[in-house]
Amino acid sequence: MPNTIKNLDEKELEKLFELYFTVLCYFSKKITSDIDASKDIVHDVFINLWTKRDEIDLKKSVKSYLFTSVYNKSLNYLRDNKKFSKNVELSDLNIASDNTKYDELIDNSLLNNKINNAINKLPKKCRRVFYLSRFDNLKYNEIANKLNISVKTVEAQISKALKILKFELKDYVKLIILLLIMYKGK
């Protein structure tokens, strides 16, 4: 891709929007703690990308430009609205100074989005059993008692969920395993 986006047409912009809108909103919400403000911020970034495409000189990828713009606008939102959340640490807000951490945050946001989409594709009963097991940390017999099903059914549903997730996330399996190993080490 050239260093400018002067040749960006409406269809390419639409593809970028479809690809990054949700994850950019999630990224902004991590900073602002306000989903409506985050949506507005992301919309503004895309409008700016389109209206100033002749002037924008890209040193990095369009993806980096979008995340950097959303990051900066989210910080401006906090500053302008004086809504520093107790949950947002200042050290978290300084991620732009360390490109490695920044890129990891972007990749983690994208990965979280992919994982959530894959989980949402599970059949309803399978998803329910999976959530109880993985997110509520219930044991198989506890899930069976709670849902009034057999332990064997719980095992079958978990097995089904893992097969579906493995297929849906096949391009990300190595990254997920690496993240799990790193997470367990902490």
Image (cartoon, rainbow, N blue to C red):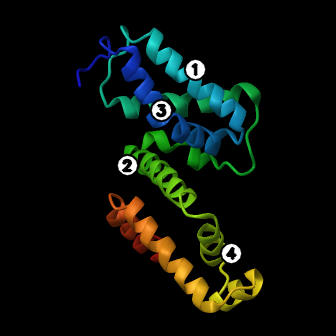
**Disc nearest the viewer among 2 and 4:** 4
Q: What residue sits right under mark 3 in the picture?
A: 18
The answer to which of 71 and 47 lies nearer the viewer is 47
Q: What residue sits right under mark 4 in the picture?
A: 136
Q: Mark 4 vs mark 3: which is more N-terminal? A: 3
The amino acid type, in three-letter code, at marker 2 is Thr
**Disc nearest the viewer among 1 and 2:** 1
Of helix, strand and loop, which one carries label 2?
Answer: helix
Query: Which label belongs to residue 100?
Result: 2
39 to 57, vertically: above or below:
below
Callout 1 touching callout 2 (CB < 8 Å): no
Work out how far the residue at label 2 is from the one at label 4, CA to CA, in angstroms: 32 Å
Of helix, strand and loop, which one carries label 4?
Answer: loop
Work out how far the residue at label 4 is from the one at label 3, CA to CA, in angstroms: 32 Å
**Left or right of residue 51: residue 88:** right
Work out how far the residue at label 3 is from the one at label 1, CA to CA, in angstroms: 15 Å
- Quadrant of image for the N terminus: top left
Q: Mark 2 vs mark 4: which is more N-terminal? A: 2
Q: Residue at x 36, y 59 (%)?
A: 172
Q: Mark 1 vs mark 2: which is more N-terminal? A: 1
Q: Residue at x 64, y 50 (%)?
A: 89
Work out how far the residue at label 2 is from the one at label 3, CA to CA, in angstroms: 26 Å
Q: What residue sits right under mark 1 in the picture?
A: 44
Of helix, strand and loop, which one carries label 1?
Answer: helix
The answer to which of 19 and 67 lies nearer the viewer is 19
Q: Residues within 10 Å of mark 4 (few under 14, many from 20)?
A: few
